[in-house]
Image (cartoon, rainbow, N blue to C red):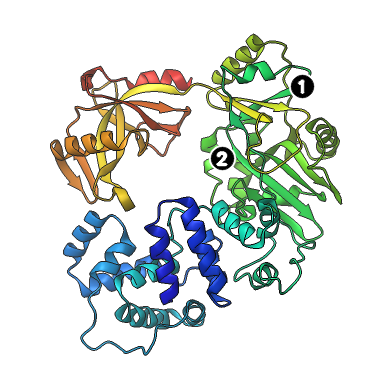
Amino acid sequence: MERFAELLDDLYFTNSSLAKETILAEYLKTAPDPDRGWALAAIGGTLTFDLFKQNLTRTLMTERMDPELFALSYDYVGELSETVALAWPVSEKPKRINRLPRLSEVIAEFNGRGKLGIRDYLIELLDAMTPPQRWALLKLGTRGLRIGMSARSVKRTLANMKGVELDVIEELWHGVEPPYQDLFAWIDGDAPMPDISNRLTYSPVMLAHPIDTEKDFSRIAAATHQVEWKFDGIRVQIAAGAAGVKVFSRKGDDISHSFPDLVEAVDFDAVIDGELLIRRNGEIGSFNDLQQRLNKKKPTKSLMQRLPAHVIAYDILRDGGTNLRPEPLSQRRIALKEFVDARDPERFTLSETLPFETREDLTALRQHAAQTGGLMEGLMIKDISSPYVAGRPKHAWYKWKCDPHLLDAVLMYAQRGHGKRSSYYSDYTFGLWAGDGQLLPIGKAYFGFTDEELKQLDNWIRNHKMQRFGPVQEVQKELVFEVAFDSAQTSSRHKSGYALRFPRISRIRWDKPAAEANQLEDLARLVK
């Protein structure tokens, strides 16, 4: 456990991605099995269990520290694990541990204990640890680890250790499981590559570059490119075969449990790439509809009937035993059409290709997308000769998103951020004026401004405080934000009756009086 804590400490305080990968590689080369496998899972985000609940650490802390003082400390620090790690008071008579157990021993011990045993063991460890070790344990135990290292960076570290292409590790990643002893045996040269032929695995998706309207249009022609709508759903990959069915998110998370109605409709042996959304009676639902299905562990039958899952198929990666990824898009498209034609149209439809000849045609299509109330985000423009490869190959696929909508809204509430922003008010709730003069909240945002602007906003908020509601600080209704967002829908869950899609701060309108901010009816017209 000591080495794992040292690893996290080194990674957390290292900024360079290359340096982080070097630090991780050195640990993975020298740490024993299965410790290094569990460490890799924790950093790579593939742990599937909590060792203990976050609420337990909060309860233990309030038993040892005045609850009000703890709340103030937590509010100031902005992160629970760090607060507990620093403030934990060592017992006068702690149960002595001769040595801290190894990472794998800690995991095995927690997993083998009941509720009371977990509590006792957590206290025992926290009493015996230093603050950095406590922080590492608390982050590990609640799967809340954020050390600025992406899953792709973790995979690249493994690829460099073995001297193989990143795609090789990407292919293996979802076919092996923590603590990855078979993977490390292959990397160390002690065993052949793990056999994942009988497992359903995720293939890293092909992504598009935002189009450069000054340079890229010269490369695009009707004879060499196909154009499709960019729908506002979530990108998914459906892998099916003798081993079963899995629905993967764009990041490779298995979300099958949230969409059993879609899984039940799968009657094929293939891997397809597409957009998951809600479709009822031939009509595409809003992202707000889809959001009601996301992250549901066990969706009810009535929910699935009211909001049925649907996939608009973009591409096909495998058909039976045939790998289609090396084939050009034009050939994959033929195979995809044959595939979708044989499926249930209530669950699967083919992405429409849109006719065009000139740049003006593309502009008109994009303008049409902007008028669909957020159902479409813009256009996808794809080179028909492109094979399906992971990542963003240059000049293969482009996305041309609609311009964001803009409204001037009034800052209403602020909260402190987390991590490096824990000392600043960086999370903002803003609203529009209703007809009766009330200011009603329409959304929240915590990005879109520079570090210097964050300091200015924090200073303004501290000088314009009103009431406080727990961690939420109300402010005087005087500061206007120009808010950018992709779309808006009606929502019964919000007091204003509306919800914004991807809101962010476009500009801080220091110059604009709050009374001149937009009205709620302006948003209502946009939705209509």
190 with respect to 241 (left or right) = left
User: Type of residue at label 2?
Assistant: Leu
Q: Is residue 50 above or below residue 385?
A: below
* Mark nearer the N terminus (2 vs 1): 1
Total number of numbered labels?
2
Query: Would you name the residue on which mark 1 appears?
Result: 224
307 with respect to 464 (left or right) = right
Element type at mark 1: loop
Give the numbered dot on residue 395.
none
476 with respect to 182 (left or right) = left
Q: Is residue 3 above or below residue 79?
A: below
Q: Which quarter of the image is occupied by the N terminus?
A: bottom left
Q: Is residue 521 above or below residue 98?
A: above
Crowding at dot 1, Cα within 10 Å, few <14 / some 14-19 / many 20+, comes out as few
Element type at mark 2: helix
Give the numbered dot on residue 290.
2
Residue 418 in view in this figure: no
Which residue is at a point 38% across and 64% down the rendered structure image? 9
User: Type of residue at label 1?
Assistant: Thr
